[in-house]
Image (spheres, helix red, strand yellow):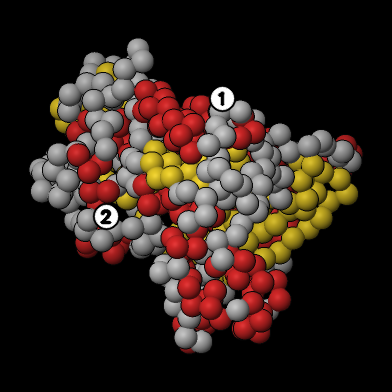
Amino acid sequence: MRAAPTILHLDMDAFFAAAEQAAKPSLRGKPVVVGGLGPRGVVATASYEARRFGVHSAMPMGQARRLAPNAAYLVPRFSFYRSISEQVMELLGLLSPLVEPLSLDEAFVDLEAGGVADDPASARAAGERLRADILATTGLTGSVGLAASKMIAKIASEEAKPNGLVLIEPGTERELLGPRSVRILPGVGPATGEHLRRAGMTTVSDLAEAGEDELVRLLGRAHGASLYRMAQGYDDRAVVAERDAKSVSVEDTFDVDLHDRTRIRAEVERLAERCVGRLRASGHSGRTIVLKVRRFDFSTLTRSETLRGPTDALGVVREAAGRLLDAVDTTGGVRLLGVGVSGLADYTQEDLFAQAEAAAEAAGERAAGEADGAARTDGVAGAETAGAGAAGPVERHWTPGHDVRHAVYGAGWVQGSGVGRVTVRFEEPWSAPGRVRTFAVDDPELTAGEALPLVRRGTPVGGAVPPAAAGHGDGSGPDPFPSRP
């Protein structure tokens, strides 16, 4: 444990939703929910305005719509969020060489290793500078926790939300933790929390008073001993600059169970393509191909195949995933599919003959899949409307929240689509709320667009204010989708 609060934890505020509000002036101060919009979709992030209605992350989207029917519901734009995350992580890298990202919007920083802090005053100054730099660079706000350990720094950043900074002085950890619920400690989930409750332990002070032997008896040697140390406020984990990725995977949950075997195979091939894209982007290859299938009755099957050497070849991964699918019974229907690659390496040592053979065998099926993929863009996708085996017209589908551009009206975003029409609001991050216009889904002047930067010429967007200070925070403002078809 350190003598100074030089471990910093940054957590961006309602990151996905805040980024959408900053990009879309008409949504500032309004409830915004980001996640899967289908019947089985779940909430990824809710803005603070939406949280006042009881909406929270991991909630079923149907329940969120019942709680906040007038909120704006948007599909995530991960490439957009990733670009903002890269800007934030670059700012963290200026503070210290030891930055440990936990997700796109969260990271630990060792300020002592960067030489920017060695006491409470300098640590607080570094944290305040970071918050100001993030706002100036991205137009978004983040909350900062400072403490002598990672556990307490993370708790402090949660206390600081939204858009604040909390510093916990070393030596006050037990006083801080004592009255809190046991669920505040890392590794205490619903099941462990309930187990402890039945044993009469609901607060952290209860754990400290119970003693290490009792916790070991209840939870086992490793977990019990670790939990006792944390209940004492002790956490000596170091900030780790690089984490070795163990696997790369993608998965999709379908609104309606898939029964058609051809469709299931096509989805597996599409997932394999996405997985390989992520694998290559991370600079890795892998030896073990994994297929995940969740069936109609929620039973989940996982099948894997280990290759002779690591690969990042699409044909090889696709073929392996197809072979794994052949061994799975999908008779009753499939609600989720996933494809992953594990056993990662930073090089490729492929059997070239086997790779060429697999690629040749997949050529015909791959051509069909890539033709379909070519019609897809970030926000608009092609869907065949003709019968099987017939070359028919393609109807474009527009995703709510995604960027578009019109030849006459310029940049905008999709508010909704249906019955052959698409509604677009034309506005930019630095403009006033824009006008709404409706077009035919196949309007040739309307195309998928690129995400615009949130900050222009170094000036934060007008909406980059603490969520609590934004107007219409109670969600009483006008429906952001008045013209949805």
Seen at 40% across and 69% down, the residue is: 179
Dot 1: element:
helix
- Lateral position of residue 341 relative to residue 135, left or right: right
Pick whichever, 433 or 1, lies toward us: 1
* Percent x, y of residue 271: 59, 48
Q: Is residue 208 visible?
A: yes
Label drawn at residue 51: 2
Pick whichever, 362 or 23, lies toward us: 23
Q: Residues within 10 Å of mark 2 (few under 14, many from 20)?
A: many
Seen at 37% across and 23% down, the residue is: 136
- Lateral position of residue 360 relative to residue 28, left or right: right
Dot 2: element:
helix
Q: For mark 1, what is the residue?
A: 94
Q: Residue furthest top?
A: 457
Amino acid type, label 1 = Leu
* Percent x, y of residue 482: 12, 42
Q: Is residue 16 visible?
A: no
Amino acid type, label 2 = Arg
